[in-house]
Amino acid sequence: MAEITGRQPPALLAIIRMIDGFTDRTGTIISWLSVPLVLAVAYEVGARYLFNAPTIWAYDATYMLYGTLFMLGAAYALHKGAHIRTDFFWEKFSIRRKGWIDTISYVVFFFPSLIMLFLISWNEFYYAWLINETSDQTPWRPVLWPFKFVVPLACLLLLVQGVSELIKSIYMARTGVELEHKEKVEI
């Protein structure tokens, strides 16, 4: 976050810094899931093509690791501005207009959608946990509740980061000052 001086309430900046710092830390931790993902894929490729001995667990492990990495990394991507936005129109808008568009979008679309997704995915996770659901994809048949828990957890992480983004948007709409300029980022 850029250093801003002037009219911003210190409590507002403290909340934003706390949430953004949390998202930075969790994003860094989550990024380490790429290591076992690469190792699992490399092992499977070696076992399959060098030794003609494919594994029964690699398919499940790789889709679960990739899905977990993708879902849990969404809050970090939101924080860094890596989500899709129509830049053709967006760059022409004033800071205030950008703030109003983001504020309305967060309140009308983002938070209600994520709350609904959280509730639905929590029920899916809880049911999978109750019945000890297993995968039908391979003979390994791993339990699915840990993987299904990733969706409500991702929703919670996105909701937390969404609070920070909403505060920044409201501030932009009211003052015309960006608390954080998001560069075009590819993650």
Image (spheres, rainbow, N blue to C red):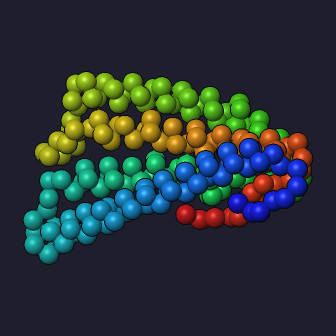
Q: Residue at x 69, y 48 (%)?
A: 14
Q: Quadrant of residue 104?
A: top right
Q: Residue at x 45, y 52 (%)?
A: 70
Image coordinates of residue 13 in percent, x first then y, are 73, 49
Foreground pick, 100 / 11: 11
Foreground pick, 113 / 167: 167
Outermost residue to the front:
10
Image coordinates of residue 62 in percent, x first then y, are 29, 56
Q: Is residue 115 left or right of residue 59?
A: right
Q: Residue at x 37, y 28 (%)?
A: 124
Q: Quadrant of residue 164?
A: top right
Say if 184 sits above or below 83 in the image.
Answer: below
Assign the N terminus to one quadrant of the image.
bottom right
Outermost residue to the bottom:
50
Q: Count the marks.
A: 0
Say if 52 sits above or below 106 in the image.
Answer: below
Q: Residue at x 14, y 75 (%)?
A: 50
Say if 130 sits above or below 72 in the image.
Answer: above
Q: Is residue 12 left or right of residue 51?
A: right
Is residue 101 visible in the rendered structure shown here? no
Image coordinates of residue 26 in percent, x first then y, are 48, 53
Q: Is residue 50 left or right of residue 120?
A: left
Assign the C terminus to one quadrant of the image.
bottom right
Is residue 34 visible in the rendered structure shown here? yes
Say if 82 sits above or below 47 in the image.
Answer: above
